[in-house]
Amino acid sequence: MTDINRRDALKVLGAAPLAGLLDWTPASMERATRHIATLTEDSGAAAATKFFTAHEWKTVRVLADMVIPRDERSGSATDAKAPEFMDFMLAEKDTSESSKVQMRGGLAWLDGEMRRRFGRDFLASSDAQRRQVLDDIAYPKKAAAEFRRGATWFDRFRASVAGAFFSSAVGWQDLKYVGNVFNPGWNGCPPEATKKLGVSYEEFDASLAKSRAGRAG
């Protein structure tokens, strides 16, 4: 499986609501964000989970980092606490039971497919073996009929990881988002652009001065 890059992850996230992949509500996401902000560095422990079992939790963390690995631009999905975000959302009362069943069933399907091929579950398998199975479920439209269930689940899992990642501080930094911050280095629109638009700062300044003089009079 080719590691998803940040641009691809954004496309997945942008398409998710349209495809009905996620049933996260704004209120639930706000609660999840606040929850993540309170977590300590040892929050990766299984005891901290609200939805996932200990085995599922380990699987989710490995799989999430295969979806969004650490690179020179920013941290990985686990660095952004995407699994913690997903765990909180799945435990939320607003999350549908079908979403919970699909997540748990998909993880069980993944382990089952790994055992069928290699005689061991996802965690016990090698990286190459994991990627071999993920290659078959990476894209629902291209997946063979026998892998449609797994592909549908993985599509949702990937969207969940992307949604959680870009809801985090790590994700914001990855996007270079700084919010409504004053830029002291802003020197205005480049001359080439104003010329193309047929305007100039001199004209604007004269118009502004005239307007102010009218109001003063």
Image: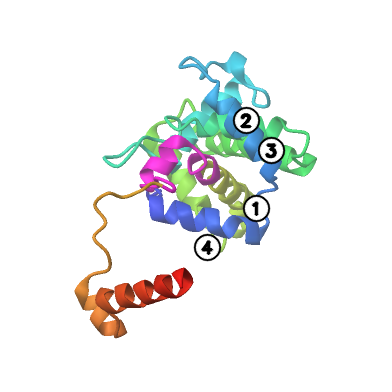
Real-space CA distance between mark 4 and mark 2, rounded to the nearest whole angstrom: 29 Å
**Can the viewer see residue 69?**
yes
Q: Residue at x 53, y 51 (%)?
A: 137
Residue extending furthest toward the left? 191
Label 3: few (<14), some (14–19) or many (≥20) C-alpha neighbours in 10 Å? some
- Residue type of the residue flagged with mark 2: Asp
Disc 2: which residue: 87
Real-space CA distance between mark 2 and mark 3, rounded to the nearest whole angstrom: 12 Å
Instruction: Please state which of the two labelled residues, at mark 4 or mark 2, is closer to the viewer.
Output: 2
Callouts 3 and 1 close, C-beta under 8 Å: no
Disc 3: which residue: 28
- In-front residue for pair 203/8: 203
Instruction: Please state which of the two labelled residues, at mark 4 or mark 3, is closer to the viewer.
Output: 3
Disc 4: which residue: 142
Secondary element type, mark 4: loop
| Quadrant in the rendering for residue 88 | top right
Q: Is residue 57 above or below residue 25?
A: above
Real-space CA distance between mark 4 and mark 3, rounded to the nearest whole angstrom: 33 Å
167 on left or right of 131: right
- Percent from the top left, x then y, of residue 151? 58, 52
**Can the viewer see residue 121?**
no
Q: Which of disc 1 and disc 4 is earlier in sequence?
A: 1
Q: Which residues are magenta?
A: 162-180
- In-front residue for pair 106/16: 16
- Residue type of the residue flagged with mark 1: Leu
Real-space CA distance between mark 4 and mark 1, rounded to the nearest whole angstrom: 18 Å
Q: Which of disc 2 and disc 4 is earlier in sequence?
A: 2
